[in-house]
Amino acid sequence: MKEKLIQRYSAAERINHWVVACFYPAFFWLTGIFGTPQLARIVHPFIGVVMFLGFARQFFRYYHHNFITDEDKKWMKAVGEVMKGNEVGDIGRYNGGQKGMFWLMVACTSLLLVTGVIAWRPYFAELFPIPLIRFALLVHASAALALIAGIVVHVYAAIWVKGTIRAMAEGVVTHAWAKKHHPKWYREMTGKES
Ligand code: HEM
């Protein structure tokens, strides 16, 4: 029997997502490509700006899907049950975990941009006092750590929940996936009651 599918992401959305993922700030491997840590340091802020711009596009596409509702709070409180495979609450396009992750990404990428610009030699750093640059670097590193931890969870969850990678690879999910994990979104997309 042919699988029934629902479109979840357009080609443009998927390209946007994978551009952001490719520019995600796990930069140490750059030293292997560019030869020296110094060169990697010079290239890193430019790559960071590309990632920020790519994410900004995602922000404007998705922020309205990520406001946290009472159903999401129910989901968050019962996350242990969800991990056992039993979904909780009438979940829309994204669940409480995905929404929390979205706002973590927003906070971290914004902090990375602002503090990165303050610390960016030789272009902007000379405009700021040295104590501020040092503080900015501390915040920059902390935001990077939080984002890296977040992305590890994001990738793990995408692999863990069977059928999710397909949403970002092919743009589609099955009716069964939508019904199980995002029942409210399923009803909105299909007009079906169950
Ligand atoms: C190898 C790395 C990555 C993988 C495998 C991955 C996988 C996925 C998948 C499968 C989805 C669709 C989830 C769904 O529709 O239910 C998704 C959504 C998304 N991803 Fe990623 N991702 C990766 C890296 C990143 C990075 C680095 C960022 C940004 C810093 C990012 C930002 C997003 C955003 C904003 C969404 C939409 C979710 C929302 O609005 O709440 N992803 N990702």
Image (cartoon, rainbow, N blue to C red):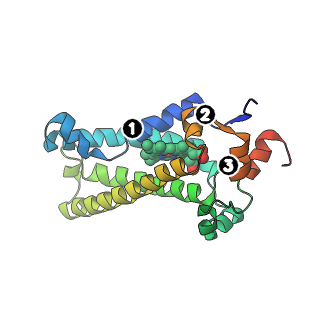
Mark 3, residues whose alpha carbon is within 10 Å: few (<14), some, or many (≥20)?
Answer: some
**Secondary structure under the numbered disc 1 in the rendered image:** helix
| Image quadrant in which you'd find residue 80 | bottom right
**Secondary structure under the numbered disc 3 in the rendered image:** loop
Q: Which circle, 3 or 2, is nearer the viewer?
A: 2
At x 30% / y 51%, what residue is drawn? Answer: 116
Q: Is residue 138 above or below residue 56?
A: below
Disc marking residue 171:
2
How many angstroms separate mark 2 from mark 1 (CA)?
Answer: 18 Å
Amino acid type shown at disc 2: Gly
Observer able to see residue 59 = no
**Residue closer to the observer: 63 or 76:** 76
How many angstroms separate mark 1 from mark 3 (CA)?
Answer: 25 Å
Which quadrant does the N terminus fall into? top right
Residue, disc 3: 93
Q: Say left or right for 152 vs 131.
A: right
Disc marking residue 30:
none
**Secondary structure under the numbered disc 2 in the rendered image:** loop
Mark 2, residues whose alpha carbon is within 10 Å: few (<14), some, or many (≥20)?
Answer: some
At x 27% / y 63%, what residue is drawn? Answer: 138
Observer able to see residue 52 = yes
Residue, disc 1: 22
Whichever of callouts 3 and 2 sits on the residue coming sooner in the sequence is: 3
Whichever of callouts 1 and 3 sits on the residue coming sooner in the sequence is: 1
**Residue closer to the observer: 15 or 159:** 159
Image coordinates for residue 154, horizontal then vertical, percent:
49, 52
Image coordinates for residue 22, horizontal then vertical, percent:
39, 38
